[in-house]
Image (spheres, rainbow, N blue to C red):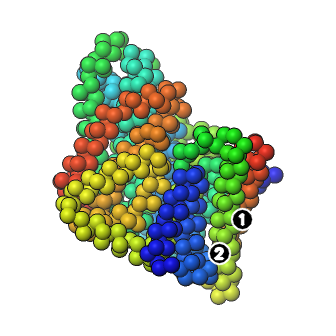
Amino acid sequence: MDPLTLGIVVMSGMLVVVLLGLPVGYALLGAGTVGYAVLSGPSQALTQVGLALWDNGTNFLFIAVPLFILMGQLIFHAGLAEDIFALAQRALRRLPGGLGVSTVLASAGFGAVTGSSVAAVATMGNIAVPQMIKRGYSDKLAAATVASAATLAIIIPPSVPLVIYGVWSETSIGALFIAGIVPGLILMLAFVATVMVQRRQYASAASLPLGESERPLSSHAVGLVSVIVIFVVVIGGIYAGMFTPTEASGIGVASVVLIALASRRLSLVALRAALKETIRTSAAIFLILTGGIILSRFLVQTRLTDAVVGLVSGLDASPQVVLLALALVYLLLGAIMDTFGMLILTLPLVLPITVALGYDPIWTGIYLTILMEIAMLTPPIGLNVFVLERATGVPASRIFAGVWPFVLASLAVVVLLIYVPQIATWLPETMR
Amino acid sequence: MMQRVIDFLEGWIAYLILPGLAVLVAADVVLRYVLNLPLRWGNDVKELLLLLVVVGALPGVGLADQHIRVGLFDRFFRNRAGQIWVALRHVLTGLVALAIGYAVLLMALDMFRYGDRAEMIAISFWPFAGFVALTAGLSALAEFVRASRAVRGDD
């Protein structure tokens, strides 16, 4: 069997076992190992597996993954997001749909100190959805707003998917974080606009009496000030070149622990839960990333990557059309595949294509992250929707029915990003 | 028994190694910028702690079936044939984990033979590679336990 055919067979076999439910990380590792064994012999295959595990497990850059996950977990358990939401809610109380807009703004604020969409949706779901339903919003509208707004956490830095993309593609993680700021803000405004466009549904609720928080306004300032301080220290430190993203993650964890302990918001039980959840999530991500690296090295050897890039480059279509078609492919993949798995599975083929089309790898990271956001909302797998269903009890089918305006808003941002790539590349260029 | 071993392992990783890693990363930055005293061995130790964190939790993730996977056809696997397929899925996963463990065990033996160690501090690599091989073996065992549960209909 020639190497190219072997690459196609291994890739197809891997997709079949993934669809049949084998863990994505093990499927990638197994496929890469079998492929190497056929191509270069079992001994070479075992050497490659051992080396990839060791190199990836001791990769200094990857330290940022468990530490940023821990930071998000600690902020979640410390309840800092409740303060941002309470302040935004009071500031926008007279605006039709003000509670919806507050939810979007609070999610963006929470996203600025956590890199995990799941942490954001679990947190905001518990805070915002009951408030919105109490004020007369339909459960569909309330849950769809939260599920969508929580996706901002992975584009507004710090972002765990951007760290993973950076490690995989050997792109500067600091530059990726900075590149996420402007698209993240545009996406936040797009979500605010989506809420405002639907204001008739929101406005009917706005006439109901506002449920005031029992705590005084000043007590909520702790959360807002903490979030601003953590964001400025972590992201400002990276932008100013003071810290690497790995160092920033350590400083971020230390800042959150100090703030949470000083404000007595972190119990021992919550701390233990945060630590345990962090190691499990990190291990699952590590396995996928390592498997993806082994498989992609194998695919490069089979020249399958070159063949696909050549095929796409030979198409009589503009780069923008190719990228729009890729976005469509990701929408379909997002319907059947987890977002991390989708990212690592497709990167070996997609990154060379976007680079060949003349787009910066940093831009590609942002483009893929927004597509991952969309995948977190679309049926049947939309992760955020299922996490929110578990947190609030609102049926997933109702949430899926309500997220479409937000999905369309996200797609509009993707189109904007394709036609105006400077949205993502301008700010990181000012770092150099 | 399996659960107790995994709880013990996860306890050490979650409550000692991970906080240790976070403290070391933060302290290194503070020492460098405030006291101009960077830890020369810092990066070597951080990288080895990271390895313990990311592989130490793998058996627990497997036993709790928390690996990232596509559950698109799960609803079709609820009858006896489905149980058999779930068991096969766990066996297949366990075999891949065993292959990983064997690959890293060979690497650990090579590291021991050649005396591989960290650059800035005298820490040998082979015990860490051995730990990776051990956790891969435990992960395989966890998958086989789940397979037997699936066959019995307890999964």
* Chain letter for the residue marked with disc 2 in the picture: B
- Does dot 2 land on a helix, a strand or a loop? helix
Q: Quick one: which residue is furthest to the front in this view?
A: A1
On residue A231, the disc is none
| Crowd class of label 2 (few under 14; some 14 to 19; many from 20; radius 10 Å) | many
Which is more toward the observer, A42 or B126?
A42
Q: Quick one: which residue is furthest to the right in this view?
A: B1
Q: Which residue is mark 1?
A: B137
* Mark 1 → mark 2, Cα distance in angstroms: 11 Å
* Chain letter for the residue marked with disc 1 in the picture: B
Amino acid bearing label 1: Gly
| Residue A308 rendering spot, x and y as whole percentages | 35, 68
The structure residue drawn at horizontal position 59% and vertical position 82%, both measured from the top left corner, is A41
| Residue A149 rendering spot, x and y as whole percentages | 36, 37
- Which image quarter is the C terminus of chain A in? bottom left
Amino acid bearing label 2: Ala
- Looking at the image, residue A234 lies above or below residue B46: above
Q: Residue A273: which quarter of the image?
A: top right
Q: Are marks 1 and 2 in contact (CB under 8 Å)?
A: no
Q: Which residue is mark 2?
A: B103
Q: In the visual, does A384 lie left or right of B4? A: left
- Does dot 1 land on a helix, a strand or a loop? helix
